[in-house]
């Protein structure tokens, strides 16, 4: 307990590992003594459809990491659909629009890369409480106390660290249910992913997905329903029922499969992202409200948190007062903010007639808005 680490990162998902890898790669001269505390042991289960967009791959590439090393499916096109209207998205200059991985495999791979580069990860230690003092942060765990000059809360949407940062609970939490099924011959081809917005008029601020997945080397499908909860509606249909109804149309009986759920916290620029010596990243702070995309954003928090931490050590100022502006002013922060804004507008349109008109006449506009405002926040160089 006497030792004071420079940095303790709570959580070794994409946000925590990306922060550690960026500190390790881009600031070795600081020689910061960094430790990750992780409550599970890799490879650990993580409920997620595993869709990683180009932005995530670019961040990994800048770290010298190649996603090709992880088992994945190349998704060559994505169907965005409302009652048979919509658009097909694909890139002509890339072999996939996104890839799907299994998170147990992806996170374990990333954790191994971090370990190989000298990042210390202590697994099977659960952080119970975080308290910030003038000169250090006290981290209480199920295996004793730790101290650090800086703590990064990268412990996901049920973040414990977040409780030290923001006392009031803000309702920026989406819900997602997921199920893995075998492929049906009459279903979508393996390389196509579908996003179905038929559920919006039924009070859901989200969609039903059907993605290809490679589970233990076997081609499967990953189905799920996402509700950002961004527009509060009384009396909306239960997520499970809506998912079961949709899957039935495709020959699946939901009852035959294991259904699991997990929250996703979405980014709201007014949220407090840090207090002195403690800052948040990834789901602990907030990711994409529009589609619930969180892997690439979590990776994208890594360089932003790293810059803020290095600034703190350089200036010997650990207030982290600039972090809110640094996140919002980043390309990732801008994209997340725009997605929150678009989700608030789009999911408010509950009328089936208006949705139909929107998809019928303005589907092309959604494609352009998506390409300009939603993706592309991480440049190649
Ligand atoms: C059903 C579902 C489907 C999804 N599909 C997609 C998708 O297809 N594409 C996409 O981009 N995003 C998707 N997401 C979102 C994505 O999974 C998250 O946004 C992403 O995992 C966030 O990464 P993170 O590192 O912030 O948190 P996490 O990945 O949740 O990692 C947090 C880590 O902290 C550890 N931890 C937690 N509490 C403690 C503690 N007290 N002490 C120590 N360690 C702790 C956890 O064990 C975990 O390893 C999905 C989410 C859900 C729920």
Image: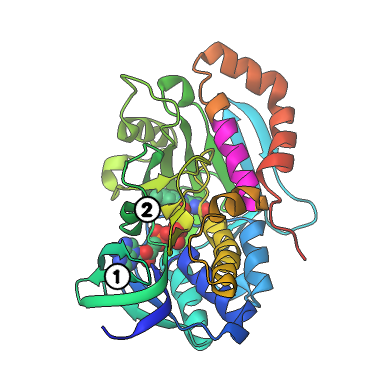
Q: Is residue 338 one of those drawn in magenta?
A: yes
Q: Residues within 10 Å of mark 1 (few under 14, many from 20)?
A: many
Q: Which residues are magenta?
A: 332-343
- The reply, left or right, for residue 41 in relation to residue 29 is left
Q: Helix, strand or loop at disc 1?
A: strand
- Residue 216 seen: no
Disc 2: residue Cβ within 8 A of ligand 1's nearest atom: no
Q: Residues within 10 Å of mark 2 (few under 14, many from 20)?
A: many
Task: Tell which of 380 and 138 is nearer to you.
Answer: 138
Q: Position of residue 339 (x, y in %)?
A: 59, 38
Task: Tell which of 293 and 67 is nearer to you.
Answer: 293
Task: Say the numbered circle drawn on residue 376.
Answer: none
- The reply, left or right, for residue 7 in relation to residue 379 is left
Q: Earlier in the sequence, mark 2 or mark 1?
A: 1
Please tell me in which quarter of the rendered image ligand 1 is found: bottom left
Mark 1, residue position: 138
- The reply, left or right, for residue 274 in relation to residue 255 is right
Marks counted in the figure total: 2
Label 2 to label 1, Cα distance in Å? 13 Å
- Residue lying furthest right in this view? 93
Q: Identify the residue at horizontal 39%, vertical 25% (top origin).
A: 232
Mark 2, residue position: 165
Quarter residue 336 falls in: top right
């Amino acid at each position: 307990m006497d030792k004071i680490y420079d940095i303790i990162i709570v959580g070794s998902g994409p946000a925590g590992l990306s922060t550690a890898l960026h500190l390790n790669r881009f600031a070795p001269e600081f020689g910061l003594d960094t430790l990750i505390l992780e409550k599970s042991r890799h490879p650990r289960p993580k409920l997620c459809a595993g869709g990683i967009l180009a932005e995530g791959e670019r961040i990994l590439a800048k770290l010298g990491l190649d996603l090709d090393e992880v088992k994945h499916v190349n998704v060559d096109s994505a169907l965005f659909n409302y009652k048979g209207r919509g658009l097909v998205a694909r890139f002509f200059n890339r072999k996939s629009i996104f890839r799907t991985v299994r998170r147990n495999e992806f996170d374990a791979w990333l954790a191994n890369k971090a370990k190989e580069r000298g990042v210390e990860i202590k697994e099977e230690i659960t952080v119970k409480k975080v308290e910030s003092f003038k000169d250090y942060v006290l981290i209480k765990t199920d295996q004793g106390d730790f101290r650090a000059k800086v703590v990064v809360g990268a412990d996901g949407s049920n973040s414990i660290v977040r409780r030290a940062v923001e006392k009031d609970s803000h309702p920026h939490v989406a819900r997602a249910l997921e199920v893995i099924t075998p492929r049906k011959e009459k279903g979508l081809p393996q390389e196509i992913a579908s996003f179905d917005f038929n559920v919006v008029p039924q009070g859901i601020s989200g969609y039903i997905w059907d993605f290809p997945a490679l589970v233990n080397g076997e081609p499967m499908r990953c189905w799920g329903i996402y509700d950002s909860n961004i527009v509060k509606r009384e009396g909306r249909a239960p997520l499970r029922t809506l998912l079961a109804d949709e899957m039935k149309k495709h020959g699946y009986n939901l009852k035959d499969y294991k259904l699991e759920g997990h929250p996703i916290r979405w980014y709201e620029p007014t949220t407090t992202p840090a207090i002195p010596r403690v800052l948040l990243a990834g789901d602990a702070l907030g990711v994409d409200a529009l589609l619930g995309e969180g892997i690439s954003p979590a990776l994208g928090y890594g360089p932003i948190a790293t810059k803020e931490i290095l600034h703190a050590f350089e200036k010997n100022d650990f207030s982290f007062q600039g972090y809110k502006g640094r996140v919002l002013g980043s390309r990732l922060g801008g994209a997340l903010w725009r997605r929150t804004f678009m989700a608030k507008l789009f999911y408010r349109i509950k009328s089936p007639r208006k949705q139909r008109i929107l998809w019928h006449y303005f589907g092309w506009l959604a494609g352009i808005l998506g390409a300009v405002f939603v993706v592309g926040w991480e440049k190649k160089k």
